[in-house]
Amino acid sequence: EDLSIQDNAIRGTNEDAITSKLSAVNAGYIQDEYVKYFHKRPVKRSPLINRGSYVRNKGLDTLIIKFLEIEDGRKQIISLGAGFDTRYFNLKSSLRKFYKYFEIDFPEITAKKVAIIRKNKTLSEIIGDDARIGRGDTEIYGSDYCLLSGDLRDFIEDLIPRLESNGFDRSLSTLFLSECVMIYMDPTNSNKIVEWIGANLNMAMFIVYEQILPNDAFGSVMLQNLKYRNIELRGIHAYPDLESQKDRYLSRGWTHAEAVDMNEIYDLYIDPKEHARISRLEMLDELEEWRLLASHYCIAWSYKISNESQIALYDS
Ligand code: SAM
């Protein structure tokens, strides 16, 4: 197996992510005025995919905001494999308070992100004019934003020291995000990250969004389609369902873990008014297909915090 071919294919998934996000924004599902800067061509994805992007985004945003609100004190966010994610810009323009937002991705991806931000006045102004660019134009060091280039397989040896020299503080509450990222990594490597945080931080949260259920008919097709593109979901057999997704943390020093699939988020969490609004945006005849798709994606989150508060998606 040629690792560099696979790494290239994995980097290519950033393009899918931003394309789908822009499609959901243009169709009215999601509000995000920054996505358009990262993808110029107008794109249209199926109503099914748009609805999926909406539920994914809604679930993740809700948990991230809960993390920012749950306790006092300075908060850090570290986005693993951030790609062209625009969350920093959205949080900042909605006046959310955080101490520092870090993003990590391969240099091939961060170089493009730097180039886009550099050319764009709106984005640069949000980061602030005191920001510096470095490491061969692949990194940005701002006062509350830091973009680092590196390989998550070298998280402990390479990235932790560089995060720390750029302001990452182990004693502060820290949220780690992996939105369709750790699933591409060998579990030995992703588990090292989960373990390190569990052992070295007292106040942390981990949020993962990724595929599950590889073994049914839909799951096999999903894996097969990726295989044609040289992409393997290396983590999916280690964490194939909601139970194992929770256990990934509980067996590694974390005290609370939750996992739900997209159907549960759609049914139990999203407001009936929002159901009505998005149903009006586009016709969705294939309800069975939506259910099937939604059952194959989950959000799992785990946390260790100083008091006994719970971080739940909804109050049951
Ligand atoms: N999190 C973003 C989002 O949801 O919009 C991007 C998701 S994209 C599907 C996966 C990203 O993870 C890509 O940008 C890829 O380059 C990055 N990635 C995967 N493995 C990585 C690794 N070992 N080191 C650094 N980045 C990695």
Image (tube, grey):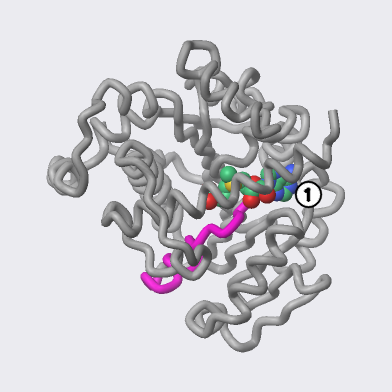
Q: Crowdedness of circle 1 by 10 Å Cα count: few (<14), some, many (20+)?
A: some
Which of the 4 quarters of the picture holds residue 310? Answer: top left
- 4 or 302, nearer to the observer: 4
Q: Which residue is mark 1?
A: 151
Q: Residue at x 29, y 38 (%)?
A: 314
Q: Is residue 170 left or right of residue 55?
A: right
Q: Position of residue 156 (x, y in %)?
A: 81, 46
Q: Is residue 287 left or right of residue 229?
A: left
Q: Residue at x 84, y 28 (%)?
A: 1
The span picked out in magenta is: 81-95
Q: Position of residue 110 (x, y in %)?
A: 69, 62
Is label 1's Cβ within 8 Å of ligand 1? yes
Question: Which amino acid does the dot numbered 1 rest on?
Answer: Asp
Residue 176 appears anywhere in the view: no
Residue 143 appears anywhere in the view: yes
Q: How many marks?
A: 1
Q: Is residue 207 left or right of residue 279?
A: right
